[in-house]
Amino acid sequence: MADYDVTHGKHPDHPELATVTLSSPSGLRATFVPGAGMVGCSLTDDGVELLGLRGGMSAYLDRGSSFGIPLLAPWANRLSSLHYEAAGQSIDLSPTATGIRIDGDTGQPIHGLFAAHPDWDLATSRAPIDGPASVTAHLDHVYGRPRFESFPYTHRLTVTASLMDRTLTIATTLAATGTRHVPVAFGWHPYLAPAGADRADWELDVPLTRRVVTGADHLPTGEVVDTPALSGPLGDATHETLYAEVPEGARASVTGGGRRLALTIEQGYSYALLWAPADPKAVCIEPMTAPIDPFSGRFPLRTVAPGGWYTGIFSITVEAV
């Protein structure tokens, strides 16, 4: 049996970007690109891709079109407008500012500022014989960086991805490195796409029951209601459901083609978005530290005091079924 391993290479379509690939003796491999927002660009099992890749790295670099396992920061999902107030500051966003992505249908800023961010620094990568294989990178968001005016809160993000047996674990820490409190609203957007089966035959299991009511504008109304857990074939159904009060240990999954892809909320994510569109063919179970439109005041907003930090952890396990 092979050992755990970490290999460094170049992205096949963008050789200017360095890749870090974690390998497990089980045949699972996960690849990350620190120089493009620390995005997870591949998760394979014995060479079979298990992530929705959509337009791939090119679309991600060109227009922030997400794919694979992207970090959504400093906020996840969408804001109601180009103006927001948080932690004692009032910010007006420019639709043409670096990092801003506008939803063409609603005009709302979406998915934060850090898509394909080039300024992540690779800190460590290691692979003990008995595992896990891991990589750590960090981003210092400070005055003078092009995206700072759109989110003027000095902080450091540190992401550690580790692969142990059949489980990929991603830990994200926000540390307030300046003199002001920093809002906590980041999340992740894994595109889970089991290979070897039609989308209609995928089995969905989402044992979350506290649904956040959203309007036609996709924004929360502030109301949370009880809803039945989802379990069964996906069929031709589509989903865009935000959940609150997500407990640690909650485990949702999509199964198809002889594999179950299970996402577990390990720590620090009290919201989750289920997004299962007709196209792309993927199920996104998105861990979020705050709801959609986090600065609206409809829900409490967590902040990190100067010198403090906050960590969110989730994992993806690939199981044979």
Image (spheres, helix red, strand yellow):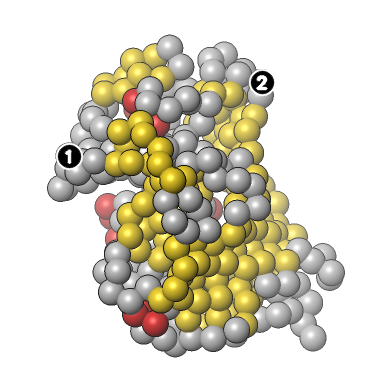
Mark 2 or 1, closer to the camera = 1
97 on left or right of 38: left
The amino acid sitting under disc 1 is Gly
Question: Crowdedness of circle 2 by 10 Å Cα count: few (<14), some, many (20+)?
Answer: few
Q: In the image, what residue type sits under mark 2?
A: Gly
Mark 1: give few (<14), some (14-19) or many (20+) Cα within 10 Å.
some
- State whether residue 207 is above or below residue 245: below
Work out which quarter of the rendered image holds the C terminus and state it. bottom right
Observer-nearest of 313 and 176: 313
The tag on residue 6 is: none
* Rendered residue at 62%/77% (across/down): 319
Q: Is residue 282 visible?
A: yes
Report how far apart the C-alphas of labels 2 and 1 lie in the structure.
36 Å
Residue 201 position in % (x across, y down): 39, 82
| Residue depicted at x 54% and y 86% | 258
Please tell me whether residue 82 is drawn above or below residue 225 in the rendered image: above
What residue lies at 60% left-to-right and 73% top-to-bottom? 318
| Label total for image | 2
User: Residue 307 has which mark?
Assistant: 2
The residue tagged 1 is 107
Q: Does residue 41 appear in the picture of this structure?
A: no
Q: Position of residue 295 (x, y in %)?
A: 38, 26
Question: Label 1's element?
Answer: loop
Horizontal side of residue 249 vs 41, given as left or right: right
Relative horizontal placement of residue 311, taking residue 35 as reference (left or right): right
| Quadrant of the image containing the N terminus | bottom right
Discs 2, 1 touching: Cβ within 8 Å: no
Residue drawn at 33 percent across, 60 percent down: 239
